[in-house]
């Protein structure tokens, strides 16, 4: 089969195999066990927070946060329009209303000016997404949240290890939700984590995560809770991955720098922008093409695919999705970025040669005159040439 360079793939070494094997052999295969405790302890330490609570996924971590804060029917939660759908869906799960606001054109994260304009008497929280690994403008958002008495929740699903003004993601709001899905910087297969410094919130979230069972009276449940727990097997994988997180972050940055060195001179291309005082986790390499339409973006992805390079489009603006289409918001930046942007492959075992190949392919597409042999500019014509 023809090789295709994937967008992402996990790095599994003997360390992960050893820990998972140990967990399986211990018999603690479900949601109790030493690896869970260790994963939570080590993750809290890594983020610099007092508490970390493991969950079944990033989505369940976010949902648990909203339920624990008592957000529900009649409430509004401000979310960026450009994000993965789970950010808004969890608001819908609790019967509150997601209020979509536009993003910053450079960082693609929620724009605090738009947040302030969207605040009403019903607003209870802001969910700030660190999109593609870049921290949202948390300092400004924290001031806003304090001023209007709102919860500030970090959706840090994509931003393990990212830094904003000297603090790690996870320690920048009232609480933060992480994902350990297989394409994330570190993975536990499926899994998530809630981090916080608030003891009351932590205890409440833990209680609700475990079916809201009374700690004093077994099988006595005082309200409707959830089973949002991670397993010891997943946590074992997570513990091993967390031990390697510094290497993953360095590699992601190096990959990005290599892309940049090849592509930064092409005037209509925009790569990840990093705000001063911030450090991105570079979860995804972002490539945005100025003035592109969605159709042109799709043609570019097809061109790459035919040459063995996987890519993915940016998220669609959530307000454009059928279930949120009646939200009637004006978010031109999110719409423009969504139509113009793709993510390129970046993963731990990726070789320099693969990055160089991808960049050469892109140069060939965007600047055919740069090549010594003239190539047709039309991707379709080029397909014929290649096929011939
Ligand atoms: C921004 C964002 N929020 C939430 C999630 C949900 O995480 P999970 O897939 O672990 O439920 C993701 C996952 O991809 C995400 O990218």
Image: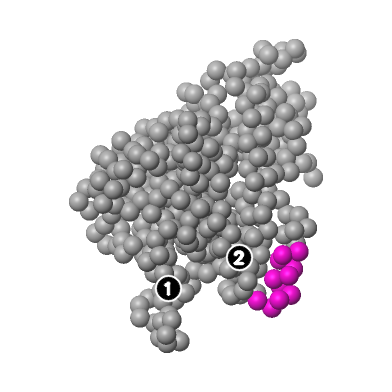
Please state which of residues 59 and 146 is positioned toward the viewer in this rendering: 146
Q: Which residue is mark 1?
A: 207
The residue at the point 61 percent across, 65 percent down is 38
> Image height check: is 375 above or below 317?
above
Badge 2 density bin: few <14, some 14–19, many ≥20, Cα 10 Å: some
Q: Position of residue 371 (x, y in %)?
A: 72, 15
Q: Can the viewer see residue 54?
A: yes
The numbered disc on residue 55 is none
Q: Is residue 44 above or below residue 108?
A: below
How many tags in the picture?
Answer: 2
Picture coordinates of residue 370, whole percent (x, y): 68, 14
Instruction: Calculate the distance from the C-alpha at mark 2 to the C-alpha at mark 1.
Output: 19 Å
Name the element at disc 1: helix
The residue indicated by pointer 2 is 38
Q: Which residues are magenta?
A: 18-28
Quarter of the picture holding the C terminus = top right
Quarter that holds the N terminus: top right
Viewer-closest of 143 and 125: 143
Which secondary structure class fits the magenta region best? Answer: helix
Q: Quadrant of residue 25?
A: bottom right
> How is the structure coloured here?
one colour
* Mark 2 in CB contact with mark 1 (< 8 angstroms): no
**Place of residue 61 in the rendered image (x, y in percent of width and height, measured from the top left):** 46, 60
Along the horizontal axis of the image, is 71 left or right of 277?
left
Residue depicted at x 39% and y 69% = 204
- Identify which residue is drawn at 66% across, 23% down: 262
Q: Position of residue 189 (x, y in %)?
A: 63, 60
């Amino acid at each position: 089969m023809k090789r295709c360079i994937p967008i992402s793939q996990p790095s599994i070494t003997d360390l992960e195999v050893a820990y998972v094997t140990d967990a399986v052999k211990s018999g603690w295969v479900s949601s109790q066990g030493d690896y869970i405790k260790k994963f939570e302890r080590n993750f809290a330490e890594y983020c610099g927070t007092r508490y970390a609570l493991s969950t079944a996924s990033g989505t369940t971590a976010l949902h648990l946060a909203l339920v624990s804060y008592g957000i529900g029917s009649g409430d509004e939660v401000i979310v960026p329009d450009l994000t993965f759908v789970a950010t808004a869906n969890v608001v819908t799960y609790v019967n509150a209303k997601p209020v979509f606001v536009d993003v910053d054109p450079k960082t693609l994260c929620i724009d605090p000016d738009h947040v302030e304009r969207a605040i009403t008497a019903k607003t209870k929280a802001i969910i700030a997404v660190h999109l593609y690994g870049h921290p949202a403008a948390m300092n400004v958002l924290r001031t806003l949240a304090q001023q209007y008495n709102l919860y500030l929740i970090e959706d840090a699903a994509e931003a393990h290890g990212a830094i904003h003004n000297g603090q790690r993601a996870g320690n920048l709001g009232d609480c933060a939700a992480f994902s350990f899905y297989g394409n994330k910087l570190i993975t536990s297969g499926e899994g998530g984590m809630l981090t916080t410094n608030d003891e009351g919130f932590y205890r409440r979230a833990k209680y609700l995560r475990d079916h809201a069972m009374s700690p004093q009276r077994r099988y006595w449940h005082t309200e409707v809770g959830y089973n949002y727990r991670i397993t010891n097997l997943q946590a074992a994988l997570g513990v091993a991955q967390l031990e390697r997180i510094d290497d993953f972050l360095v590699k992601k940055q190096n990959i990005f720098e290599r892309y940049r060195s090849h592509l930064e001179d092409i005037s209509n291309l925009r790569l990840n922008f990093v705000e001063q005082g911030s450090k991105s986790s570079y979860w995804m390499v972002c490539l945005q093409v100025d003035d592109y339409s969605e159709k042109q973006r799709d043609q570019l992805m097809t061109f790459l695919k035919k040459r063995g390079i996987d890519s993915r489009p940016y998220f669609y603006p959530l307000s454009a999705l059928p279930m949120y289409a009646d939200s009637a918001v004006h978010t031109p930046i999110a719409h423009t970025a969504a139509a113009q942007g793709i993510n390129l492959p970046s993963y731990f075992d990726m070789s320099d040669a693969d990055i160089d190949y991808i960049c050469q392919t892109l140069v060939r597409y965007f600047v055919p005159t740069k090549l010594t042999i003239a190539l047709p500019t039309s991707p379709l014509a080029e397909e014929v040439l290649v096929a011939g």
